[in-house]
């Protein structure tokens, strides 16, 4: 009998859950996702909802195009257009997703492109003018630091290759160490990225 296969993390909005800031979703019916669903291997989460944000909610962006890891480490913030600081909710949601990833030994994630939480490659620059910067969202950055291969909904085939290359089997192993925080006080409220 073969070892059980690890689940693949997928953003809830990509499965049709109406959890986006505008109350909508971005349902995707790609064949790879359908295969993983048939295998019972999809772990569905929305970091922003897990962090306590309502749906709908005001759009939010990471300040100064700093990227999600800077938010996690307390070096940048996530603000709404009105200037409300929603960083604690983004960090809390990322922490809950990280806990699930650790518990289920997830190695591959497919997350929503452009999201300040989930965007694996780019996010908006914090000025609410539609410009993007090559920085991941909070959850995507944290998962990458933990060693998870993170893709967006335009990369299903690449994600499937990464899943196949990892064998998808649940087994032990070490993970990368946590990036150094600027100070113990700034990092004290954030869960560790260390295995």
Image (cartoon, rainbow, N blue to C red):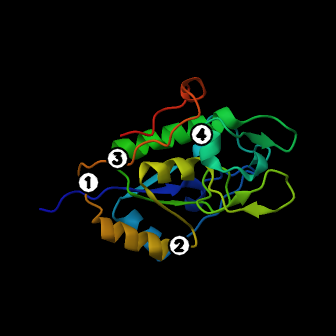
- Name the N-terminal-most of marks 2 and 3: 3
- Position in image of residue 52 (x %, y %): 63, 34
Whether residue 35 appears in this view of the structure is no
Residue topped by disc 1 = 170
What is the number of the mark on residue 155?
A: 2
Residue topped by disc 4 = 72
Q: CA distance from mark 2 to mark 4?
A: 25 Å
- Position in image of residue 28 (x %, y %): 57, 68
What is the number of the mark on residue 66?
A: none
- Name the N-terminal-most of marks 1 and 2: 2
Q: Nearer the viewer, residue 12 or 38?
A: 12
Residue visible at 33% across and 64% down in the picture: 39
**Label 3: element kind:** helix
Q: Nearer the viewer, residue 35 or 75?
A: 75
- Name the N-terminal-most of marks 3 and 1: 3
Task: State the image quarter where residue 152 is shown.
Answer: bottom right
Tell me if 165 is positioned left or right of 87 in this view.
left
**Label 2: element kind:** loop
**Label 4: element kind:** helix
Q: CA distance from mark 3 to mark 4?
A: 22 Å
Classify 167 as above or below 70: below
> Do the residues bearing badges 3 and 1 touch, measured as CB atoms within 8 Å?
yes
- Position in image of residue 141 (x %, y %): 55, 51
Residue topped by disc 3 = 104
**Label 1: element kind:** loop
């Amino acid at each position: 009998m073969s070892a059980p296969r690890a689940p693949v993390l997928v953003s809830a909005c990509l499965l049709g859950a109406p959890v986006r800031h505008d109350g909508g979703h971005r349902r995707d019916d790609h064949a790879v996702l359908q295969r993983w669903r048939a295998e019972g291997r999809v772990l569905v989460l929305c970091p922003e909802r897990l962090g306590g944000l309502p749906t709908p909610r005001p759009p939010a962006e990471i300040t100064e195009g700093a990227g999600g890891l800077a938010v996690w480490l307390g070096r940048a913030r996530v603000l709404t257009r009105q200037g409300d600081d929603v960083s604690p909710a983004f960090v809390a949601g990322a922490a809950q997703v990280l806990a699930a990833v650790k518990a289920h030994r997830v190695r591959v994630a497919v997350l929503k492109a452009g999201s300040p939480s989930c965007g694996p490659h780019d996010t908006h620059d914090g000025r609410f003018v539609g410009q993007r910067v090559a920085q991941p969202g909070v959850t995507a950055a944290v998962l990458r630091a933990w060693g998870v291969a993170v893709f967006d909904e335009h990369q299903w085939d690449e994600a499937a290759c990464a899943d196949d290359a990892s064998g998808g089997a649940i087994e032990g192993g070490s993970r990368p160490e946590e990036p150094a925080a600027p100070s113990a006080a700034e990092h004290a409220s954030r869960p560790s990225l260390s295995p």
